[in-house]
Image (spheres, rainbow, N blue to C red):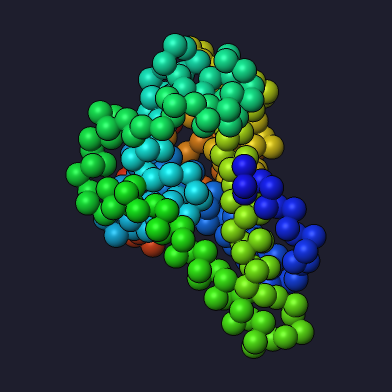
């Protein structure tokens, strides 16, 4: 709630080119950290990577301000197990606002679903990120402020400042990432098209897909959750998969899991 109210501070701090750059970079890191790190890697093991890069992706996910990796993955796996049925924590069948963000105010969203993340609990660094996610975000906040102040000193004509960097690089970008990710739970279970016979209400939505780098092809994802590729057809733009292919050619990730040959791609 405070983050949403804090968006109004933009009228006080104004805008500058460095602040816009920080907003776009910060937003991209947050969205990528959730959709590729938390979602495709940790929740569904859609590809393999080193333990070091796994930590880096999880760290980017933590910066999105959506709790630690064990909490996020546990709830997401619960969503797939009971999608749009009793047991799904954020199905739109309980109301659109509920699925978008209302469920976050419910006591049922608070605990980590440990029984669903036993595999992740083996990694001490992921447990550490879960336990100290707020400390990580505090450190990121201080770095943004320090970066803005440094820019103000080095280039006074740019109009940047530490406070401006906090508003654009922390508050606005976090809220932007929030609603993009939440739209997969709400919009992508109400609006869009279907082509596969799934037991849920999932939909493919091109606007959400562009917003969150390909995760808006949500119906494709529910049809084949383990696939690292969510955009099955050539026109279904999936920036996350493009990045993963590039990383695979560099040897950073490998064993990208793809849809079954029977899937129309």
Relative to 224, residue 209 above or below: below
The residue at the point 59 percent across, 82 percent down is 150
Q: Quadrant of residue 170?
A: bottom right
Find the residue positioned furthest to the bottom: 154
Residue 220 visible in the snapshot:
no
Q: Residue at x 51, y 36 (%)?
A: 230
Which quarter of the figure has residue 192? top right
230 on left or right of 226? right
The residue lying at 39 percent from left, 62 percent from top is 250
Q: Is residue 22 above or below residue 86?
A: below
- In the displayed structure, would residue 56 be above or below residue 184? below
Q: Percent position (x, y) of residue 258? A: 41, 36
Q: Is residue 166 visible?
A: yes
The front one of 19 and 45 is 19
Q: Nearer the viewer, residue 127 or 52?
A: 127
Name the residue located 58 percent from the left edge and 28 percent from the top edge.
102
Q: Position of residue 33 (x, y in %)?
A: 47, 51
Q: Percent x, y for residue 143?
A: 50, 70
Q: Is residue 129 left or right of residue 167?
A: left
Front-most of 236 and 120? 120
- Looking at the rendered image, the quarter that the N terminus falls into is top right
Where is residue 99 shown, x and y percent of the image? Answer: 57, 25
The mark total stands at 0
Q: Quadrant of residue 135?
A: bottom left
């Amino acid at each position: 709630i405070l983050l949403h109210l804090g968006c109004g501070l933009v009228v006080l701090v104004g805008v500058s080119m460095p602040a816009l750059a920080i907003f776009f970079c910060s937003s991209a890191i947050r969205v990528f950290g959730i959709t590729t790190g938390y979602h495709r890697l940790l929740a569904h093991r859609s590809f393999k990577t080193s333990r070091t890069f796994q930590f880096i992706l999880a760290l980017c996910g933590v910066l999105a301000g959506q709790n630690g990796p064990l909490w996020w993955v546990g709830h997401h796996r619960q969503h797939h197990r009971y999608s749009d049925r009793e047991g799904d924590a954020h199905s739109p069948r309980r109301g659109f606002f509920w699925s978008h963000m209302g469920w976050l105010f419910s006591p049922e969203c608070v605990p980590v679903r440990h029984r669903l993340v036993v595999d992740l609990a083996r990694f001490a660094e992921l447990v550490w990120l879960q336990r100290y996610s707020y400390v990580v975000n505090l450190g990121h906040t201080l770095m943004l402020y320090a970066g803005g102040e440094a820019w103000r000193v080095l280039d006074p004509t740019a109009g940047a400042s530490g406070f401006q960097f906090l508003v654009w690089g922390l508050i606005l970008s976090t809220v932007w990432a929030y609603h993009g990710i939440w739209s997969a739970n709400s919009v992508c279970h109400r609006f869009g098209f279907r082509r596969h016979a799934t037991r849920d209400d999932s939909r493919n939505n091109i606007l959400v897909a562009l917003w969150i780098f390909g995760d808006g092809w949500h119906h494709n994802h529910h049809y084949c959750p383990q696939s690292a590729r969510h955009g099955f057809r050539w026109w279904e733009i999936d920036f996350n998969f493009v990045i993963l292919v590039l990383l695979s050619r560099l040897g950073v990730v490998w064993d990208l899991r793809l849809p079954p040959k029977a899937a129309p791609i």
